[in-house]
Image (cartoon, grey):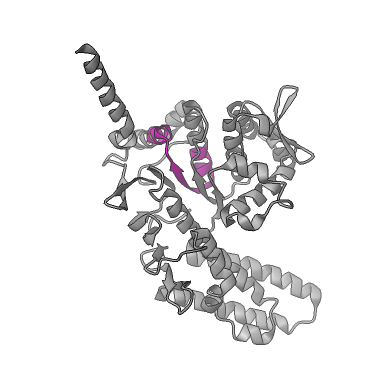
Amino acid sequence: MHSNEQMIEIHNLGPIKNIKLPIKQFNFLIGEQATGKSTICKAIYAFDRIRSQIEALLYRLYSSSEQSIASFNLRKRLNEKDNRNIIEDILGFSYYKPQDLSLIYHITSEKSINISVRKAINTPYIDISFNQLMEDKLSELVKKHRQLALNLNKSDNFDFLMEERSHAFDAIKEDVSKIFENNEKTYYIPAGRSILSLFAGQSAVLDMNSIDLISKEYIKRIELLRHDLSNGLLSYARAFLQENIDENVTKETNKIDKYIKGKYINRNGVDYLQIGDVMIPMNHASSGQQEVMWIFNELFLILLKKEKAFIILEEPEAHIYPRLQLELVKFIAHVVNETGSTIFITTHSPYILTSLNLLCYAGVVAEGKNDTTAVSKLLDGNVLIKPGNVVSVKLEQRGGETIAESLLDDNEELKTEMIDGVSNTINELYTSLYDLEEK
């Protein structure tokens, strides 16, 4: 899990002028359209991608010439065009790069990564840099793997070379995770899932260059999962666990089938919702089923594999009834608690946040009673959110810039009056109409 010291600073990116946002185990953003919710998610994802790029560049050391190994400069390689283009794509800089941009990700109070824009005669370009402690840690890492790669280059034993490279790659992943204090695998589940999942399987005929990087990666992930889940979640779980399946796994798959009102299967590359003996093509299922199905599928696989994940989930409420919004939030909390993962959710829904509030209160009650068993039994699962583990923020446009205001009060519960301001407006208008009628 990310340490509680982690924080992101965003200056002059999209609608956001100046925001500092801590990152904890549970993170929720609410706000009107164009207030910067997705902007924050993409900034976080860009920093995570830098971690992946560092791993990939170090991997390549082990297949490089001695001259390339000796001259390897990590920061210079990170800022080469191909790597910069990936970060620019994530941040949406295809056409315009704000020259006063500054993004800072604080891994701890002493370690940080920076993304800024450097001025150039023709085209400004982004620059990735690190504070001194991070620079020192990464320099030590490069030195270590540069020497290992040079030593391996002297071997002409192919089997030995392959085995040692495999060990080196494991070491790189572990070393980078220690420096970043984060060993989570990141899943970005974007808005518009129903359309994007229909695109999966058609990438050969789509113009993938016209699709943003986050959507492309989601489509490719779904394409791979379709094959794995062709006979449904329970069938995959049996194969993964080598038939050593317990009642908890069966319970979770039954829950998901109940929530989406059917069982997901795939036949010859086509998604179906199986209801009894009837198979309904997924593109003929309800929009709510299409939107929520792959959320449940991906979350279940994270739970099954006990995988520590950083999950960015946009608008989970899309097209689903308030009751299912509650069950989805509970399922998310269960997965996060069971795996030690981190979740970052954007939403427009007061029901998502009132569901969050319920689980926050459950955490307060459990801590006060020093008893999680009774609370978990009442809520049917390990779904409570411990005090101190949540960030919940409302984004609002004021004076031409986005302001972030915490939704949590001193008791770690949500300020309900801030969640659903439109209800007050509707009530006031209703009262005015009533008064008008009575005149």
- Give 324 or 36, whichever is nearer the viewer: 36
Residue at the image point whose x is 72% and y is 34% from the top: 265
Q: Is residue 8 above or below residue 426?
A: below
Residue 439 at least partly seen: yes
- Picture coordinates of residue 206 (x, y %)? 69, 51
Q: Is residue 153 above or below residue 311?
A: below
- Give 104 or 247, whichever is nearer the viewer: 104
- Picture coordinates of residue 232 (x, y %)? 71, 35
Residue at the image point whose x is 53% and y is 79% from the top: 76
Query: In this image, 394 relative to 183: left or right?
Result: left
Q: Quadrant of residue 130?
A: bottom left
Query: In this image, 123 relative to 104: left or right?
Result: right
Chain part drawn in magenta: 332-359
Q: Is residue 190 above or below residue 322?
A: below
Q: Is residue 158 magenta?
A: no
Q: What count of labels does the image hold?
A: 0
Residue at the image point whose x is 50% and y is 44% from the top: 336
Q: Residue furthest top?
A: 438
